[in-house]
Image (spheres, grey):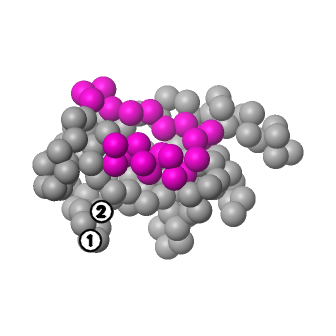
Amino acid sequence: MGILNNLMDKFKNAEFTVAPQKKLKTISADFKKAFNLSLVFYKGVQIADGDLTLAALNKKTSKEVKSTADGLKIKASMKVGDAEKLFDTNFGVTVQIKDAAGTKLVPNGITIGQAARGEY
């Protein structure tokens, strides 16, 4: 069943896009709808204000990062750690992917699809 699930992940939620002009709480809600996982944004070590846009949070961080206007795409077949790195690379922000309740970190070495199915 694992091979079939991994194959299905390549096609499922292939177009989940993160745009810099969206509010953090909207991106988190969309992520939860798509993958049934929590996406938490940080400014330093504190959880970021959900009313900020991704672009506004980027301006508050110390990193100089050129964000692309069209955002980035997250797929179920991506590893959790790779998806988290994309946010840092493209927007200069730290994110953590957690379980649906937002209480437990998801391991970086599994795919988002595996995490969505609770395979950790």
Identify the residue at horizontal 50%, vertical 46% (top origin).
82
Q: Nearer the viewer, residue 65 or 95?
A: 65
Quarter of the image for residue 51 reads bottom left
Quadrant into which the C terminus falls: bottom right
Judging by the rendered image, the residue that carries numbered circle 1 is: 46
Q: Secondary structure at mark 2?
A: strand
The circle drawn on residue 97 is none
Residue 74 magenta: yes
Whether residue 29 appears in this view of the structure is no
Identify the residue at horizontal 30%, vertical 62% (top origin).
42
Residue 26 magenta: no
Quadrant into which the N terminus falls: top right
User: Could you say where residue 81 lies in the image, as x and y percent from the top left?
Assistant: 51, 52
| CB within 8 Å, label 2 to label 1 | yes
How far apart are the two marked residues, 2 and 1, measured between alpha carbons?
A: 6 Å
Quarter of the image for residue 95 reads bottom left
User: Could you say where residue 112 lies in the image, as x and y percent from the top left?
Assistant: 59, 48
User: Could you say where residue 78 lies in the image, as x and y percent from the top left?
Assistant: 58, 41
Whether residue 96 appears in this view of the structure is yes
- Left or right: 98, with 115 as reference point: left
Crowding around mark 1 (Cα neighbors within 10 Å: few <14, some 14 to 19, many 20+) is few
- Left or right: 38, with 45 as reference point: right
Judging by the rendered image, the residue that carries numbered circle 2 is: 42
Q: Nearer the viewer, residue 80 or 24?
A: 80
Crowding around mark 2 (Cα neighbors within 10 Å: few <14, some 14 to 19, many 20+) is some
User: Could you say where residue 15 lies in the image, as x and y percent from the top left?
Assistant: 49, 29
Q: Which residues are magenta?
A: 68-89
Q: Secondary structure at mark 1?
A: strand
Amino acid type, residue under disc 2 in the picture: Tyr
Identify the residue at horizontal 54%, vertical 51% (top origin).
80
Q: Nearer the viewer, residue 38 or 112?
A: 112
Amino acid type, residue under disc 1 in the picture: Gln
